[in-house]
């Protein structure tokens, strides 16, 4: 079964099958749709036509339903979603808003559960947990 991802603000699900659909905006004001893989550690992504993102660009993610910001208040380069597993546990998932930066942190019950990606050491995970 695919994991369900919900927006921390409106709690509607933002995944379609195994993909996560978000809206995003670059620092230059470009806006578009972003598809991310719902499989943590898979950094394949796709962007809507004319939403041209190159490595190193920052995309501020928003919820496509409530338009609330998904940017983590705790760290300026991370966004946050909630993953709901088959037992209805809610796991916080943090990921980078910098395109090309491959790092994902799963936090459950104030503990770091799993980390993913080549750049997972970019952000100190204990920092994330301490400041929840
Ligand atoms: Zn929302």
Image (tube, rainbow, N blue to C red):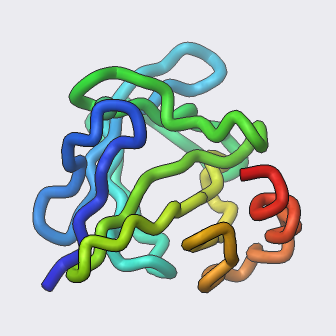
Q: Position of residue 31 (x, y in %)?
A: 41, 22
* Mark count: 0
Q: Position of residue 13 (x, y in %)?
A: 20, 49
Image quadrant assignment for residue 65: top left
Which residue is painted at 59% across and 59% down in the image?
A: 94
Q: For this view, does 28 lie left or right of residue 3? A: right
Q: Quadrant of ligand 1?
A: top left
Image position of 30 with respect to 56: above or below: above
Image quadrant assignment for residue 7: top left
Q: For this view, does 127 lie left or right of residue 83? A: right
- Give whichever of 33, 63 is nearer the camera: 63
Is the N terminus in the top left, top right, bottom left or bottom right quadrant?
bottom left
Which residue is painted at 36% across and 78% down in the image?
A: 39
Q: Position of residue 126 (x, y in %)?
A: 85, 69
- Give whichever of 32, 69 is nearer the camera: 69
**Which residue is most to the front?**
109
Image position of 13 with respect to 48: above or below: below
Image quadrant assignment for residue 26: top right
- Give whichever of 9, 45 is nearer the camera: 9
Which residue is painted at 41% across and 69% down in the image?
A: 44
Image position of 110 with respect to 117: above or below: above
Q: For this view, does 124 lie left or right of residue 51? A: right
């Amino acid at each position: 079964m695919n994991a369900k991802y919900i927006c921390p603000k409106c709690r509607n699900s933002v995944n379609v099958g195994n993909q996560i659909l978000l809206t995003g905006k670059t620092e230059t004001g470009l806006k578009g749709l972003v598809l991310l893989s719902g499989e943590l550690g898979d950094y394949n992504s796709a962007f809507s036509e004319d939403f041209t993102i190159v490595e190193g660009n920052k995309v501020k993610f928003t919820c496509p339903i409530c338009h609330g910001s998904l940017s983590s208040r705790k760290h300026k380069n991370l966004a946050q979603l909630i993953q709901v597993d088959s037992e209805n546990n809610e796991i916080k998932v943090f990921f980078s808003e910098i395109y090309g930066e491959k790092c994902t942190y799963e936090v459950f019950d104030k503990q770091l559960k799993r980390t993913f990606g080549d750049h997972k050491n970019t952000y100190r995970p204990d920092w994330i947990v301490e400041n929840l």
